[in-house]
Image: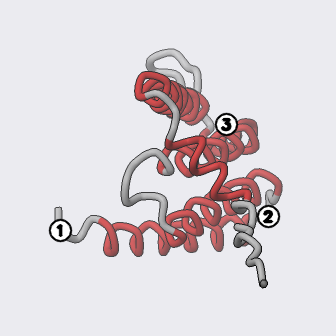
């Protein structure tokens, strides 16, 4: 007489367990997380605008090159953090959690952090050209139907 052993299922992968836990979050908590991420992103846009705008009185001349050199590092670090938050926020929007969008967001973050560390003018120009190319690609790929 032969007995069969029951089939043993392998344990779910780490990513599956994470996705399952995320799917089981109550809708209110899910909404709260989304709102907090979006509000934090909006506040980072305000911070970048504040860093990009120099102080000065009306009629007073402003040295934009000196202002850029003084705030460049913090400005690009905040933009890099903004893109990392965009990556996290996109995971909550159906259809935006694709590998391509993750690569784009991580590339932007890497470029902004690099721009915050490298002060060479030619390197800044290359980073600006790459950022422009990525932005054109993103608009062509994802906003063509708008």
CA separation, marks 2 and 3? 16 Å
CA separation, marks 3 and 1? 39 Å
Mark 3 Cα shell of 10 Å, populated few (<14), some (14-19), many (≥20): some
The tag on residue 67 is: 3
Residue 99 position, x and y percent, is: 54, 70
Point out the frontmost of discs 1 and 2: 1
Query: Which residue corresponds to mark 2?
Result: 120
**Residue 53 visible in the displayed image:** no
Residue 56, quarter of picture: top right
Answer with mark 2 or mark 3, whichever residue precedes in sequence: 3
CA separation, marks 1 and 2? 38 Å
Query: Which residue corresponds to mark 1?
Result: 145
Q: Total of numbered circles in the picture?
A: 3
Furthest residue toward front: 1
**Residue 44 visible in the displayed image:** yes
Left or right: 45 in relation to 113: left
Furthest residue toward bottom: 1
Mark 1 Cα shell of 10 Å, populated few (<14), some (14-19), many (≥20): few
Query: Along the line of sight, which residue is nearer the eye, 53 or 16?
Result: 16
Answer with mark 1 or mark 2, whichever residue precedes in sequence: 2
Query: Along the line of sight, which residue is nearer the eye, 68 or 112?
Result: 112
Mark 2 Cα shell of 10 Å, populated few (<14), some (14-19), many (≥20): few
């Amino acid at each position: 007489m032969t007995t069969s052993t029951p089939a043993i299922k392998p344990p779910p992968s780490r990513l599956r367990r994470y996705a399952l836990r995320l799917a089981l979050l109550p809708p209110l908590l899910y909404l709260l997380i989304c709102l907090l991420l979006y509000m934090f992103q909006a506040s980072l846009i305000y911070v970048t605008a504040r860093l990009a705008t120099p102080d000065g009185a009306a009629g007073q001349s402003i040295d934009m090159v000196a202002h850029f050199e003084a705030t460049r590092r913090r400005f690009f670090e905040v933009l890099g953090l903004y893109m990392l938050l965009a990556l996290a926020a996109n995971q909550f929007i159906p259809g935006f959690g694709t590998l391509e969008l993750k690569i784009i967001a991580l590339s932007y973050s890497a470029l902004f952090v690099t721009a915050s560390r490298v002060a060479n003018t030619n390197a800044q120009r290359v980073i600006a050209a790459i950022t422009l190319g990525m932005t054109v690609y993103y608009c062509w790929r994802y906003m063509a139907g708008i």
